Amino acid sequence: MKKVKIGLLGFGTVAGGTFDILKKNAKLISKRSGCEIEVAKVFARNIEKALAKGLPAELATSNVDEVICDDTIDIIVEAIGGIEPATEYMLKSMKAGKHVVTPNKAAVAANYKELTETAIANNVSFRFEASVGGGIPALTAIQEALSGNEFLEVMGIVNGTTNYILSCMQADGMEYKDALKDAQIKGFAEADPTADVEGIDAANKLSILMTLCFDKYVNPNDIPTTGISNITMKDIEDAESKDSKIKLIASAKLSGDQLEYSVKPVLIPNSHPLASVSREYNAIYLTGDAVGELMFYGAGAGAFPTGSAVVGDLIAISKTV
């Protein structure tokens, strides 16, 4: 059985989950992929922290070039996060003939064109299923099973932090600041929650969805974006009186030949499937001219859901290596 070697850049939540899934389900993955997928090297900025999380010492390096420039490595998983140096590392990996997989929505959204063109120019694969919706396999479905559709609309709850906060306000009667604190305690919100609560994270994900659904790239900075930090209990109560819920919705819709898009809090009727998406869960609701309406639902973040999507990309590429 052929071996496919993986280089991990980063050993945080998602990379750790990916590593554990590859180890735990190794036999199953080998059977389905037709090859043995093994992690050969891991770049970690903080080696001690990575070792404490279970990274074997013989795989660890603090020199990123030891991973990218290793000729025996077939696929690089970029899981550092942020735009730079993540984009630089991905481009360098592609130019070195490596396939690239990433869950990094910020880098993909900001540099989609350069990343995809560099992958094509170097005859390597570039997959980023985990960048939108965590473990939800929506991007693969859009690019493959649904590729015969003209998409008319995509809308979704694509940020688990804000959905958790709004759910606490709606179901538990918590004020915004208390719901945010609860989300931070439970690990659903960062110490600095700005990217989540102000809609920046959702805008990154919408940019990716629009590119795939409508073949139109829009920089996340150009997407009209409003977060949830000004939502009050009065707003929640007003929504309830209208048999609705407030959700942070990332949406794009064809109107004639124009594409309308935004990220903002929206009143969703309780009769709509998106209204039932609660706590940290995500959902992506699509309308295609052939398939009609459909919704993808599942865990939008976390080590294993997101790691599941990364592993799916690794298996898909491994079949072609």
Image (tube, rainbow, N blue to C red):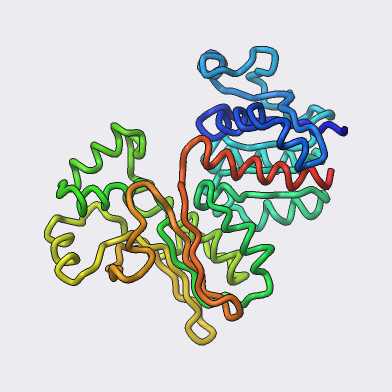
Residue 121: horizontal and vertical position, in percent?
81, 53
Q: Is residue 254 above or below residue 144?
A: below
Q: Looking at the picture, how far across and down is residue 209, in whole percent?
A: 54, 62
Q: Is residue 83 above or below residue 117?
A: above
**Residue at the spot 65% in from the left edge and 58% down from the top edge:** 113
In the figure, is residue 140 to the left or right of 52? right
- Number of marks in the rendered image: 0
Residue, x 33% and y 53% (percent of image)? 278
Name above or below for residue 67 compared with residue 153: above
Position in image of residue 284 (x %, y %): 47, 61
Q: Quadrant of the C terminus?
A: top right
Residue beneath the point at 59% across and 29% down: 10
Residue 188: quarter of image: top left
Residue 47 in the image: above or below residue 24: above
Quarter of the image with the N terminus in it: top right
Image coords of residue 308 (percent x, y)? 59, 41
Query: Residue at the bottom extreme?
Result: 256
166 with respect to 200 (left or right): left
Indicate left or right for 52 with 55 as reference: left
